[in-house]
Image (cartoon, helix red, strand yellow):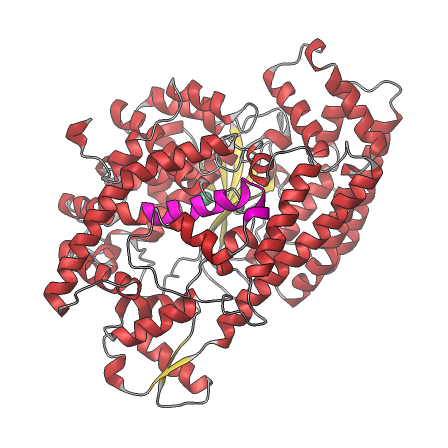
C-alpha cells in the first residue's frame, strides 16, 4: 500500500512523513498524473462549458498531484539524498510534459475561451473574474491562440532559449572554476580574518601548492578577500578576473550568447503579440508596463545619486587619510567601506548575538504575530515530521479555531540546501486549511551553548515568517489564487514588511534579552543597528538601479540595434557609474540573474518591494506598531487576500492610496526627514 495514495491518517490531514519512503514517490506521481488527466477529461465531457464546470473545475483538478509533488520537492530541498535527486531528474520531465499536455490542449482551450467570451454576462465577483482571466491568459501566454505553424515555431524558440541560457550558465561556471590565484608571502594576506586565511591555505593545498594561499572567484573566497585584503594588488587581480568573466573573446565568451538570448526573447514576445519581452513579462506584474518601471527607476535614481556622490567623497577622504590613496578604484571600494563602517559604528555580530537566543527569538516572532493578528502557535508532537529537528505546530485563530499547520526547520544538515525559504505542503482553498513551512540554516545549539543568532539571522527569520503569514492567514476560494500566489513584484511585501518589527523597541523588548544576565537589549545598540543599516545606502541603491536599468534596456526594445555588448553596457551604465571605468571589464557576460535565472525584466522588483514595505510599514509607525486596526486591515486586504484581485487594488484598500517612495527614501536616509 502506497501511503501517498491512501487517505493521510494524521491530525489535520498532515503528510505521512513517518510512512513515506523514496520508492513511493514515482508510482504515486504517475498515478496522480493519471487522475489529474481524468479530471481534465471529465471537464471536456460537459455538454456546455460554464464557469463552474470548466474554470472552477480546472482549479480543483489535480489536487493529489499538487500535494504529492509539493511533499517531494520540499524534501528534495530540505532533506534530500542521492536517491531523491535521481528521482527528481526522472519526475521533472513527467511534470513538464503533463503541464504542456494541458496548456496545449486545444479542445480544453476552446471551452475556456467560450466562458471567457461571456465574461461580462456571467455576473462574476472580483475573485471569480481574476480566476477566469488568469486561466485564460495562462493558455494564451503559452501560445494557445497561435496557428499550428506559429505554435511549433514557439516550441522551437523555447528549446533554443533553454539551450542558450544553459550555455550562458555553463560558461560562467567554467570561467569561475578556471581561475585560481596564489600568494606566496604571508604579508600579502595577514590582514584577512583568521578563518579566511585558513580557508585560503586549505585551497592552496588542494590545488597542489601547500604552504601558500589561494583565492578563487567563488563568493566565500572572493568576497572576504575584496573586503579585508589590505594588499591592493591582490584586490586588483581578483577584481579584474571577476569583472572580465566570459568577456575575453575566447570560447567561453558570452557576448554572442547574450545577443542570441535577447533575439529569441524578442521573437517570442512579438510572436505572442507583444511589443517587447518586457511588455510580455510586465503584463503579469504589479508594475504593469516598461514605462512605469522606467519612471520608477529614474525617480529613485534622481534621489539616490546625490547621496551616492557624497558617500564616495567621504570614502575617498577616508582612504586618503589612512593610506594616502589619491583615487579610489573599483577594487578599493569594499575594502575601505568596511574600514569606514567599523570606524563609524563599531558594531559587530558578536556584540549582538547574546541578545538573540533562538528559542526566545522564535517566541518573539510568535508573540508578534499574536499581538498583531491574534493567532497562537502550540507544538503538536502527533503531527509527523520529516526530520527530528523539525517542529510542527498547530496554529489557531483569535477564536481558538484551527487555522493551519506550521512546520519550523531551523538547523543545517547534509541534505538541506543553503539559505532560508518558506514553502507549503498543502495549499488553502475554501474551508481547506494550509500546511506551511519555513526552512533556515541557523547555528545549532550545543550541550553547553544555546543557539545565538546574528542580527541578520533575526531579520531572516522575521522575513520568512512574514511569507509564512501570507500562507497561514490565506483565505481564498481558489487554491491557484490563494496565499503567496500573487504577482512576483508583490510577493515580498509580507516578508519584507515583517522585518521592520526587528528594529522596533516595542517588539525587541518581547524577546531580545541577554541569554545569561537577562538584561534587555540597550536602546543605544538598537539605534546603532538602525544607523549601520543605512550605511552607504545611496551607493547601494545606485548599484541596484544600475542592474535594473541595464535589465530593462536589454529587454524593452528590439535587440537588433545592439551590435556591441561592450558599447551598449557602457552607454547604459554611464549614468550610474561613479568610479573610474576599467577598460576590458563587462558585467553583462556574467549577469546570471537575467540571462540564466528568471529575473529578466524583473530585477527592478527588489527595489519595488522595498518601496511597498516601507510605505506600508509607515502606516504602522503612524498608528502604532501593534495597532489593532491597522493590523486587521493589513490582514484583510493583503495577507488573507492572496491574488484574488490585482495587487494595486488590494494595496490601495489597505493604504488608502497608491504606494509612494517617500517612506523608503526616509528610512534609508536618502532624504532628510525635516525636508518633508
Ligand atoms: Zn522573501
Query: Quick check: can you spot residue 95?
Result: no
Q: Position of residue 470 (x, y in %)?
A: 49, 34
The answer to which quarter of the image holds residue 373 is top left
Q: Is the residue 504 above or below the residue 383 in the image?
A: above
Q: Is residue 151 left or right of residue 70?
A: right
Q: Residue at x 41, y 50 (%)?
A: 571
Q: Is the residue 9 above or below the residue 115 in the image?
A: below
Q: Nearer the viewer, residue 253 or 649?
A: 253
Query: Quick check: can you spot residue 304?
Result: yes
Q: Is residue 620 left or right of residue 316?
A: right
Asked whether residue 67 is drawn in magenta, I would say no
Q: Position of residue 541 (x, y in %)?
A: 32, 45
Q: Nearer the viewer, residue 341 or 527?
A: 341
Q: Position of residue 330 (x, y in %)?
A: 30, 62
Q: Position of residue 514 (x, y in %)?
A: 21, 52
Q: How many marks?
A: 0
Q: Quadrant of ligand 1?
A: top left
The answer to which quarter of the image holds residue 443 is bottom left
Q: Residue at x 48, y 36 (%)?
A: 489
Q: Nearer the viewer, residue 88 or 104?
A: 104
Question: Which range of residues does the magenta coloring cover?
Answer: 541-561
Main secondary structure along the magenta-highlighted residues: helix
Q: Residue at x 59, y 38 (%)?
A: 276
Asked whether residue 554 is drawn in magenta, I would say yes
Quadrant where the C terminus is found in the figure: top left
Q: Is the residue 86 above or below the residue 440 in the image?
A: below
The answer to which quarter of the image holds residue 204 is bottom left
Q: Residue at x 49, y 49 (%)?
A: 421
Amino acid at each position: 500500500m502506497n501511503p501517498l495514495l491512501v487517505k493521510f491518517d494524521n491530525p489535520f490531514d498532515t503528510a505521512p512523513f513517518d510512512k513515506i519512503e523514496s520508492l513511493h514517490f514515482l508510482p504515486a506521481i504517475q498515478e496522480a498524473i493519471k487522475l489529474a488527466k481524468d479530471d481534465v477529461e471529465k471537464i471536456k465531457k460537459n455538454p456546455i462549458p460554464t464557469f463552474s464546470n470548466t474554470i472552477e473545475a480546472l482549479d480543483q483538478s489535480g489536487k493529489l498531484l499538487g500535494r504529492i509533488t509539493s511533499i517531494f520537492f520540499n524534501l528534495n530541498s530540505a532533506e534530500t539524498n542521492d536517491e531523491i535527486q535521481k528521482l527528481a531528474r526522472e519526475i521533472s520531465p513527467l511534470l513538464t510534459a503533463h503541464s504542456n499536455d494541458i496548456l496545449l490542449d486545444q479542445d480544453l482551450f476552446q471551452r475556456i475561451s467560450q466562458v471567457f467570451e461571456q465574461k461580462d454576462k456571467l455576473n462574476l465577483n472580483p475573485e471569480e473574474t481574476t480566476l477566469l482571466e488568469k486561466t485564460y491568459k495562462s493558455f494564451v501566454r503559452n501560445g494557445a491562440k497561435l496557428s499550428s505553424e506559429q505554435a511549433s515555431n514557439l516550441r522551437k524558440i523555447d528549446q533554443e532559449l533553454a539551450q542558450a541560457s544553459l550555455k550562458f550558465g555553463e560558461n560562467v561556471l567554467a570561467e569561475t572554476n578556471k581561475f585560481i590565484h596564489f600568494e606566496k608571502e604571508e604579508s600579502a594576506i595577514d590582514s584577512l580574518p583568521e578563518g579566511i586565511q585558513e580557508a585560503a591555505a586549505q585551497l592552496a593545498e588542494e590545488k597542489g601548492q601547500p604552504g601558500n594561499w589561494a583565492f578563487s572567484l567563488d563568493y566565500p573566497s572572493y568576497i572576504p578577500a575584496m573586503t579585508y585584503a589590505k594588499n591592493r594588488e591582490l584586490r586588483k587581480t581578483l577584481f579584474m578576473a571577476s569583472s572580465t568573466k566570459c568577456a575575453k573573446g575566447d570560447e567561453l565568451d558570452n557576448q554572442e550568447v547574450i545577443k542570441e538570448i535577447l533575439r529569441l526573447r524578442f521573437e517570442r514576445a512579438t510572436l505572442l503579440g507583444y511589443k517587447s519581452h518586457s511588455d510580455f513579462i510586465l503584463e503579469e506584474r504589479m508594475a504593469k508596463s516598461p514605462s512605469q518601471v522606467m519612471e520608477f527607476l529614474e525617480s529613485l535614481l534622481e534621489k539616490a545619486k546625490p547621496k551616492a556622490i557624497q558617500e564616495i567623497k567621504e570614502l575617498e577622504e577616508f582612504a586618503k587619510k589612512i593610506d594616502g590613496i589619491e583615487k579610489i578604484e573599483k577594487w578599493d571600494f569594499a575594502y575601505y567601506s568596511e574600514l569606514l563602517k567599523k570606524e563609524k559604528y563599531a558594531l559587530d555580530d558578536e556584540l549582538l548575538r547574546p541578545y538573540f537566543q533562538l528559542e526566545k527569538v522564535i517566541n518573539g516572532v510568535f508573540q508578534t504575530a499574536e499581538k498583531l493578528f491574534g493567532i497562537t502557535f502550540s507544538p503538536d508532537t502527533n503531527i509527523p515530521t520529516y526530520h527530528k529537528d523539525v517542529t510542527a505546530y498547530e496554529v489557531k485563530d483569535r477564536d481558538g479555531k484551527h487555522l493551519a499547520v506550521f512546520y519550523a526547520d531551523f538547523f543545517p544538515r547534509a541534505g538541506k540546501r543553503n539559505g532560508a525559504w518558506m514553502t507549503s505542503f498543502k495549499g488553502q482553498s475554501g474551508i481547506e486549511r494550509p500546511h506551511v513551512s519555513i526552512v533556515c540554516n541557523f547555528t545549532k545549539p550545543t550541550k553547553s551553548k544555546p543557539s545565538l543568532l546574528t542580527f541578520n539571522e533575526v531579520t531572516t527569520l522575521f522575513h520568512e515568517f512574514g511569507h509564512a503569514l501570507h500562507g497561514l492567514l490565506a483565505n481564498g476560494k481558489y487554491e491557484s489564487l490563494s496565499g503567496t500566489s500573487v504577482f512576483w513584484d508583490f510577493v515580498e511585501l509580507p516578508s519584507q514588511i515583517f522585518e521592520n518589527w526587528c528594529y522596533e523597541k516595542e517588539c525587541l523588548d518581547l524577546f531580545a534579552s541577554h541569554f545569561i544576565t537577562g538584561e534587555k537589549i540597550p536602546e543605544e545598540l538598537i539605534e546603532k543597528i538602525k544607523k549601520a543599516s543605512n550605511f552607504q545606502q545611496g551607493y547601494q541603491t545606485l548599484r541596484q538601479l544600475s542592474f535594473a536599468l541595464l535589465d530593462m534596456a536589454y529587454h524593452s526594445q528590439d535587440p537588433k540595434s545592439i551590435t556591441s555588448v561592450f558599447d551598449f553596457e557602457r552607454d547604459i551604465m554611464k549614468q550610474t557609474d561613479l568610479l573610474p571605468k576599467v577598460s576590458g571589464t563587462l558585467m553583462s557576460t556574467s549577469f546570471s540573474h537575467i540571462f540564466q535565472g528568471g529575473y529578466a525584466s524583473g530585477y527592478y522588483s527588489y527595489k519595488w518591494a522595498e518601496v511597498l514595505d516601507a510605505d506600508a510599514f509607515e502606516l504602522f509607525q503612524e498608528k502604532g506598531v501593534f495597532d489593532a486596526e491597522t493590523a486587521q486591515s493589513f490582514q484583510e486586504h493583503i495577507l488573507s487576500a492572496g491574488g484574488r484581485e490585482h495587487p494595486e487594488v488590494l494595496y490601495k484598500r489597505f493604504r488608502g492610496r497608491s504606494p509612494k517612495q517617500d517612506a523608503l527614501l526616509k528610512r534609508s536616509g536618502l532624504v532628510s526627514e525635516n525636508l518633508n
